[in-house]
Amino acid sequence: MLFDHMTQFLFHFLDIKVLSSKAKRHYQQSLESHCLLFTTKGTAHLTLGDHQYRLPKNGVYLCSAESARLLKVDLEKLTTVYLVTFNALSQSAKRWETKNDRGEAINLEQTDEIIRLCNSLLSLAESPIEEDILLSQAHFYLLLHTIIQHRKTPNRDLQHMLEKTKQHMEYHFREAIQVKDLAQMMNISAKYYMELFRKQFGISAIQYLMNVRIEASKWLLIKGGKTLREIASEVGYKDEFYFSRRFKQQMGMSPSLFMKSRRKNIAVLDSSFFGLLAPLHYIPIAAPLHPTWRYYYYKTFGNHVPVQLAVGRTPAVLNENIAVLLQENPQYDYIFCLDNVTDEQLTVLQKGGHVYRLAWSSLSWREQLLEIAKILDAEMEARKWLIEYEQTVQDAVASLAYISHERSMLFLLVRGNECYLYQDRSIQEVLLEDLGLNVMIANTQDPITVRELAEMNPDFIMVLVYEDEESMMKWNELQSDELWLELKSVRNDTVYTLTHFPWRDYAPLPHLLIVKEVMQLLTADSSL
């Protein structure tokens, strides 16, 4: 690889320029020297002689004058590219050109320092001070050093590709999937793929695929309306008898017995209980649901909840929901509520069945899950789910290792006409404690100004915006502020807008979704 050999040669920096689609969409020049192209925003398309290359954001392409005499750069909308030209010094030029051939494209794990050095080179290249030529040469070598230091290594690429094959199984488990197909996605042998997968995830690829299929089958069994043959077919098995054997092997009971074990009349007075019941594979028959607020639950479970209550935690809403519960079904197996329910409301609820008031304010989400599982005699299912959650966290920590301590993250809440640093129990326990990310903590509940944000200048900003008109106007205003536009995270396109679910729901299922979303956002691993 070319970057592996750069330390063997001496170079002379010539010039640097910024190519921007705002000024011009197409660039063309004779290539009389070596060059390095670095895309900081958008996507560029390079043409070198008869060869074409795609250079995505955070991508670097290195080529020599010998690889092609004409360089063409086509920029998509909102694209920025640094073009650095340099020469190999005479004593090493011949060897450099021999090794260089067509050039080399690499992707970077971190770009902040590289952008800073490119901007320094721009300033030095325009400096009228003669001595600054020496500084420009020094900064050029620092630039090369930083690119080599922050490029994605072969091990990271392997890990990235393994994660993609894992996601492929999660999205396409209904189809016929063979190990050789997964190995082909990585362009390696099936045997080597199996070894890598087990080493990375602590489980064989075949076992993982079976886990995904059995998990999907549980929900089909619970929701009902399908034969065993139909369920087997929908989760990737042609034979319902083979599926039944696999299910019993995994769960310790037959599909029919599992389905029977989940037939309990459960009512919940808060939609957060979906996040506790889902890991245990229970669907309540009465629950608060709304097509906008916690849309995930409405979409996933709405058709299977016959008694849909109002969403809210005020005393008036609780009283209304209690009245509806007692009217619709005077006897439930279990009624679950949070500790915002008063003793008086609890007495009324007990007319409808066994009531459990969860100590939501004092118990951690793991303790809450085990408490509910104990009541429903589903402790084995809860512990199994927690093990799988911890494995997902370990996978995420491994993927995010290069940013966990070095790069800072800030959560911004836009509410009304003000902005606040945001932190709740979910961020504290999932982001800080489980994932070990460097999250900036709020020392005050006072609003934060754009100038204060600029002083903090985080690497990542995660934004939660209230969906009322005033909050949306404030968010639009903030995005056009000059100080905001100068923030490192804005320049690097690492500002992410989040939805209130799962980010503001304190429960096991939303926390699992948060871990997966963070891994997807920060590793840009969204394409399958």
Image: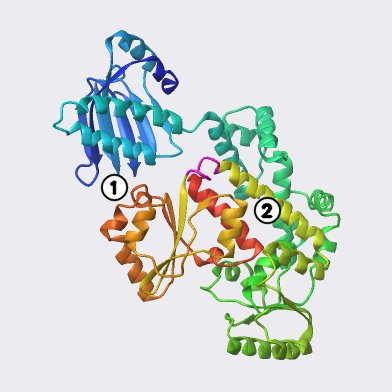
Checking the image for residue 389, the label placed there is 2
Q: Is residue 251 left or right of residue 366?
A: right
Q: Residue at x 59, y 71 (%)?
A: 298
Residue stretch rendered in magenta on the structure:
400-406
Q: Relative to 204, say whether 189 is above or below.
A: above
Which quadrant holds residue 299?
bottom right
Which quadrant holds residue 322?
bottom right
Residue 236 seen by the camera:
no
* Residue 2 highlighted magenta (yes or no): no
Real-space Cα distance between discs 1 and 2?
Answer: 40 Å
Checking the image for residue 77, the label placed there is 1
**Secondary structure of residue under mark 1:** loop
Q: Main secondary structure of the magenta part?
A: loop
Estimate how packed mark 1 is, as few (under 14), some (14 to 19) or many (20 or more) residues with alpha carbons within 10 Å.
some
Q: Residue at x 60, y 38 (%)?
A: 162
Indicate the position of residue 224 as horizontal and vertical percent values: 73, 67
Q: Is residue 428 left or right of residue 447?
A: right
Indicate the position of residue 354 as horizontal and vertical percent values: 80, 81
Residue 263 seen by the camera:
yes
Q: Residue at x 59, y 46 (%)?
A: 396
Dot 1 amino acid type = Lys
Residue nearer the viewer, 197 or 53 = 197
Q: Residue at x 53, y 74 (%)?
A: 291
Indicate the position of residue 55 as horizontal and vertical percent values: 36, 36
Indicate the position of residue 504 as horizontal and vertical percent values: 55, 67
Dot 2 amino acid type = Tyr
